[in-house]
Amino acid sequence: MKEVKSRICCWLLCCLAAGCADRSASPADDAPRNPAACGVSLSLAFSVDGSGPDASGTGEAPGFDSENAIRNLYVFTEVSGRRTAYPFRHVLLDEDGTTGRKTAVLELPVDVREVGEMFLYLGANLDDRQAEAFCDGNKAYTLDGTETPYNYNVVESFAPGVATDGGASSLRTDIAMFCTQGQKARPVVGEDGERVVVEAEFELRRLVAKVLVTCREDDGHSGYAPLKEGGSLATNGGWIRLEDVYFLVNSLNKSSFIMEKEDEDPNNDLTFYLDEKGGYDGSKTSKDFVYAAPGLQYEVIGFFKRAPKYEENRLPDENRCGGYRPEEALYCPENLFGAVADEGKKKVLEEYEYVWPMITHVSVAAKYTPGRLWIEKELVAHVLRRIDAGAVADEHGLKAALEKWSEQAEAAGDPVMEVECSDEYVSQTLLTESLKKENYYSEGTYDPDGGGFPRHTYFYYDNRKDDTREDRYYTYGAVIRMLGDSFDAEEPEKLGNYLPYTQGWGYYYTYIDGAGGDPAGGATPYSRGVVRRNTYYILIVNSFSHPGSSIHDGGYIDVHTLVEEWKEGGSGEIELQ
């Protein structure tokens, strides 16, 4: 997939006019002034060209103009190493943030008699702290710590305007942008003392990356995700609905340079976060990154976004932004890191079994319903009684299946038995009714302090911890029978190697492959996980192999990554190269 660079271009006409600067014309209250300096002032004439391709009428999904809208501009001058910011707001732009081709003039109080070499820089949609960070030597812009520790708030600092409900209103409308480099201007007063004009063109790049996760549809099973042949899920049978696949961009960088530095990042050294035991120092990673650990991701489930179905005809190409709507994607700050020279530390990074919280990655949540279940044999008679009492609906052949299994239950010598469920309803009913029968059922979502498990929770025996046994899927009552005397009724949530999947949800991760394609060996290695600003990453979940678990093994999903440019959306001129 070839790389196409996205550019929003602005032109500045730097005009030198004789006379005293009109200070009232400057919106920069803190701009340096010399009351005695009445000579030549600097005017900037802006032209923002929005006459390029427009998303409307070209088969694009709506909303791309929101990603390109420019609602304010900041002009920066640099003279003798000193940078000064001048905000230029609501002059070029319509109320909806679009530009067309418009020109306006900003008077700057610059005494050009004292100016030798001068550089100009341009930023868009910046807040005051971001402008100050650039003026202060382009030092790292870092969140001040008052933001609540959720991914939403981190991204909001770089790309405001999203709704927390994750719905159609979650469009970014003020994405921060900055020029790729300064433009040198040498202002010279003409013999007539009037003006000279210097034209400068700026390429603006967004400070965030865009990430979309899509999921393939299983051949012949409309509405369901593929289960990888040979994996535990496919071997056991069962179902993952496409509508039950969600994603979150995790481990977000709290710091960024306003003007990009090639291959540099404020948190560039991965080895700084390693501890002496082959893991990471949580006090360091939590200071610099926002990370939701696998076992705690249920706490931020509201920030997950549903993954749309993969459709090739909706992908962007050199002529179009694509059919996936902007609100289907998530955004994240840039997160770069350098190569590790120390071979010992490099080996630690390569061989770590889990996910590194200092590397931006994608967390995927998927709800799996087992096809084959190990149940406690008395559950059969219990559910039959509940059907007869009208407490459980006899749908999808449930009662007929139970009556067939009742003969198997009577003949079973063991306290548990394996049954094959014909569809999701049958399996989910058995899982929920077992919890109710054992008085360990809780309404709503999972609450670790509330006691009990919610509906559709299954229990997976993880044979990676004990390879002498098969990996199997159990009801809660069956787990109790399997544990026997080791089950402690005073601590009913402690189930040994039987891992609970509350409501059927399993969590996975994959690094965002900055190189694109399919990495050797399936799972994306950490070393390919750099995330660059102004880049569009499209991840395609090809299949699911295992149910995922609290240890969050990245090998559980097969992912292909496309690295795309951010395409034009009709607000400001964007050129494709």
Image: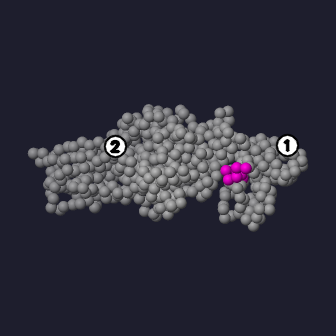
Q: Nearer the viewer, residue 213 or 169?
A: 213
Q: Nearer the viewer, residue 132 or 408?
A: 408
Kind of residue at badge 1: Ala
Left-right relation of 476 to 520: right
Q: Is residue 494 above or below residue 458?
A: below
Disc marking residue 365: none
The colour style of the image is one colour
Magenta span includes 90: no
**Residue 417 percent coordinates (x, y):** 82, 49
**What residue span does the magenta drawing correspond to?**
459-468
Image-quadrant location for residue 558? top right
Name the residue beneath numbered marker 1: 400
Magenta span includes 463: yes
SS under mark 1: helix
Q: Residue furthest front?
A: 344
Mark 2–mark 1 CB contact (< 8 Å): no
Identify the residue at horizontal 53%, vertical 39% (top origin): 520
